[in-house]
Image (cartoon, grey):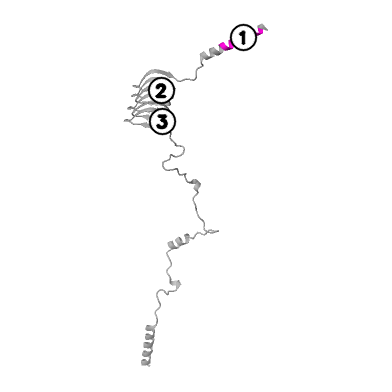
């Protein structure tokens, strides 16, 4: 009996040795480790977005985009007028036209009708100008009509036949020649007198005709 029991135990032991051991991955779902609560909350918060009617595209409203301007062009509403800059080593002669602003650092002998003239401390202008505003830090000699404003800086010198709407002369500035303020159009007295004579003559002629009748 003891011998047969030993043989039975050996047989069972050998059978267990040759049986296929279960893989570690073949564990029941109940034995799987559950993620920490923080990961569970994160997964529950992240949900896929679903839309109805197909894929939705989020485009950009082109009407809100700023209008592009050509390279080098000034933005709308900030256009600058034509400007001429005469440098310190330049001597210019002639007639200046189609110029909104003239800046003189050299020497200019010309006639000009424009909006603005600026003569720097080193600038010299000889000639005739008809402008809105003049800012003189250098020298001007000639005929000037500044319809709105004439400013003579402390280093400026203006001589000639000068008419202006308003004038400002800083201490040290020099002005010589004929100065007159531009005012409204004055009535032409000579024309009124001549028209009065004509009216009186016509009245006398009419009265003489009545007497003759």
Q: Quadrant of the C terminus?
A: top right
State which region is magenta.
Answer: 197-210
- Residue 212 visible in the shown view: yes
Q: Residue at x 61, y 10 (%)?
A: 203
Residue 132 vertical position relative to residue 79 in the rendered view, above or below: above
The image position of residue 71, as x and y in percent, is 42, 43
Q: Quadrant of the N terminus?
A: bottom left
Residue 211 vertical position relative to residue 132 in the rendered view, above or below: above
Q: Residue at x 38, y 88 (%)?
A: 11
Q: Earlier in the sequence, mark 2 or mark 1?
A: 2
| Residues tagged 1 and 3 counted as in contact (Cβ below 8 A) | no
Relative depth, front residue between 9 and 84: 84
Res. 188 mark: none
The image position of residue 193, as x and y in percent, is 53, 12
Q: Residue at x 41, y 30 (%)?
A: 101
Label 1: few (<14), some (14–19) or many (≥20) C-alpha neighbours in 10 Å: few
Q: Earlier in the sequence, mark 1 or mark 3?
A: 3
Distance from Cα at disc 2 to Cα at disc 1: 49 Å
- Main secondary structure along the magenta-highlighted residues: helix
Q: Secondary structure at mark 3?
A: strand
Relative depth, front residue between 112 and 3: 112
In this rendering, which labeled residue sits more in front, label 1 or label 3?
A: 1
The residue identified by callout 1 is: 205
Distance from Cα at disc 1 to Cα at disc 3: 59 Å
Label 3: few (<14), some (14–19) or many (≥20) C-alpha neighbours in 10 Å: many
The residue identified by callout 2 is: 144
Quarter of the figure with residue 179: top left
Res. 101 mark: 3
């Amino acid at each position: 009996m003891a011998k047969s029991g030993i043989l039975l135990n050996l047989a069972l032991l050998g059978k267990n040795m040759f049986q296929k051991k279960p893989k570690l991955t073949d564990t029941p779902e109940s034995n799987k480790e559950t993620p920490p609560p923080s990961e569970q909350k994160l997964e529950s918060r992240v949900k896929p977005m679903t839309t109805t009617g197909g894929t939705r595209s989020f485009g950009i409203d082109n009407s809100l985009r700023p209008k592009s301007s050509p390279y080098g062009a000034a933005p709308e509403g900030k256009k600058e007028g034509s400007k001429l800059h005469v440098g310190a080593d330049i001597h210019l002669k002639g007639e200046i036209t189609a110029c909104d602003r003239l800046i003189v650092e050299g020497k200019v002998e010309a006639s000009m009708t424009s909006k603005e003239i600026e003569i720097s401390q080193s600038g010299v202008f000889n000639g005739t100008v008809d402008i809105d505003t003049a800012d003189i830090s250098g020298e001007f000699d000639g005929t000037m009509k500044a319809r709105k404003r004439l400013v003579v800086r402390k280093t400026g010198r203006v001589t000639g036949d000068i008419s202006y709407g308003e004038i400002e002369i800083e201490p040290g500035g020099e002005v010589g020649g004929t100065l007159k303020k531009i005012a409204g159009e004055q009535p032409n007295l000579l024309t009124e007198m001549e028209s009065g004579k004509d009216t009186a003559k016509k009245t006398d002629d009419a009265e003489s005709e009545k007497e003759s009748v």
